[in-house]
Amino acid sequence: AVYSGLQADGRTLIDYARVQSQSYWFTYDEAMPVKSVTSSVADHMMSFAGTDDDDEEKRKKKMSRPFGVAFILAGVDDNKEPSLYVIDPSGTTVRYLAVAVGAGGESAMSVLQDRYAKSMTLREAEDLAAEILKQVMEAKINKDNCEIALLSAKTQKFEKYNQEQIEQVLARIKREDHEED
């Protein structure tokens, strides 16, 4: 999961998603489907609204304001099909093939709509993501202010790139920039 917005709200929602996933695992002895995790988080995000419950405990657990985050949730289910969802601050969920949120999210989304293809290789997708980050970031992109991760459909694991791998991706887009000059 990745979020953009209030850091405390984002961490609270990540913790909530983890607890829900663990509870599901202990109950059903299988991983919680990505869509179910997404729905659970979205329901929780909408729970700030008033309640008609007479139960004082349930009323105390309700938030007094909406969560101030947009949330990207990704995963791979047992069918080996990757899923990517965005939950906006209102709790609305939308499934995407490629998505961006936060500062520069709109311009990043327009580039993704123009250039993303489901048939892209991993290398092409890495290059596109790095190019988009380079365009929308205020600071110059480098290995210290950029993180890249891969959610592999084969292994069903989230793999965060190390500094060397990030440098390789950034070097490729720098080479392409020089070739265009």
Image: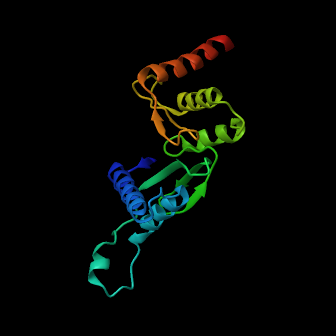
Left or right: 65 as drawn, with respect to 88: left
Determine the residue located farthest toward the bottom in the rendered image: 54
Above or below, 112 relative to 93: above
Residue under the image location 54 percent in, 33 percent down: 136
Residue under the image location 43 percent in, 54 percent down: 69
Residue under the image location 54 percent in, 53 percent down: 86
Q: Nearer the viewer, residue 5 or 16?
A: 16
Q: Is residue 116 visible?
A: yes
Quadrant in which residue 132 is drawn: top right
Q: Is residue 181 visible?
A: no
Left or right: 161 as drawn, with respect to 122: left
Determine the residue located farthest toward the front in the rendered image: 29
Quarter that holds the C terminus:
top right
Q: Position of residue 113 (x, y in %)?
A: 69, 42
Q: Position of residue 165 (x, y in %)?
A: 48, 22
Above or below, 176 relative to 17: above
Q: Nearer the viewer, residue 151 or 173?
A: 151
Q: Nearer the viewer, residue 4 or 57?
A: 57
Residue under the image location 36 percent in, 85 percent down: 53
Q: Position of residue 50 (x, y in %)?
A: 39, 78
Above or below, 181 relative to 129: above
Q: Position of residue 134 (x, y in %)?
A: 54, 27
